[in-house]
Amino acid sequence: MPTQAQWYFDFVSPYAYLQFKRLNQVPSSLDYEMVPILFAGLLKHWEHKGPAEIGPKRIDTYRHCQWLAEDLGIAFRLPQAHPFNPLPYLRLCIALGSAPEVIGAIFDYIWTEAPPVHSEAGIKEIARRLEINDLGVHLDAPETKKQLRANTESAIAAGVYGVPTFVVGTERFWGLDQMGMLSQWLAKPDELAHIATENVSEVPTGL
């Protein structure tokens, strides 16, 4: 029986885009749901800054993602402005059922074409490509806003603090660099039991 999981992401994250392009590396034994959330909501809840809010880290993040994309053979271009407000893209995604093809279209648009994602023209263009005529209705629908809040609250309840993150039961696998760890966990859970969340969460702090 496949293992159930959630993959939490936000379109604003270049690492989420890169991991999306590597999801074919995830073992077929993992049955996961793609869940759009608001990264800024995580930052507010956990009271910490995102990479783009720290000057040098922002630049280093862009450098690393560009190198990583080239190393992995993934198309990558920074949008015209970053960070940007991802709310309209997240809401559009949810309004369209968070279908994988919709998620892929939005990710590719943002991270390969250098579009003006920070402007109204940016969201209107991807909506046009997705053949959405009543964009305002989709973005302002109360049920869409409610779903995004619920998704983000669900992620927080699972201890998610960054994107992208896989949650498998009580275990979190944060970021593209933990995909190998995820694969091993699924293949050899008994051998990795010593690093299970419940076995390391009781370590006291020395501060």
Image (tube, rainbow, N blue to C red):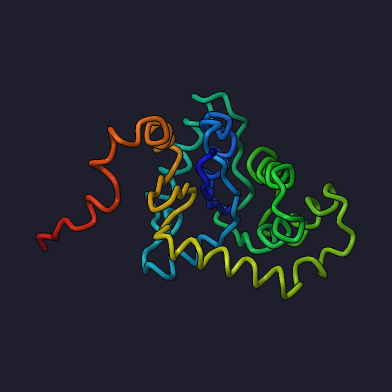
Query: Residue 44 appears at what percent x and percent y?
Result: 44, 70
Instruction: Report the residue that reaches farthest toward the front.
Output: 1
Quadrant in the picture for the C terminus: bottom left
Q: How many marks?
A: 0
Asked if residue 91 lies left or right of residue 126, the reply is: left
Query: Residue 33 appears at what percent x and percent y?
Result: 59, 49
Q: Is residue 136 above or below residue 129?
A: below
Asked if residue 155 lies left or right of residue 32, the reply is: left
Query: Residue 183 appears at what percent x and percent y?
Result: 43, 32
Pick the front one: 29 or 58: 29
Q: Residue at x 59, y 29 (%)?
A: 74
Indicate the quadrant where residue 60 lies.
top left
Pick the front one: 174 or 55: 174
Quadrant in the picture for the N terminus: top right
Q: Residue at x 23, y 50 (%)?
A: 199
Instruction: Report the residue that reaches farthest toward the bottom.
Output: 142
Asked if residue 82 lies left or right of residue 60, the reply is: right
Query: Residue 6 appears at what percent x and percent y?
Result: 53, 50
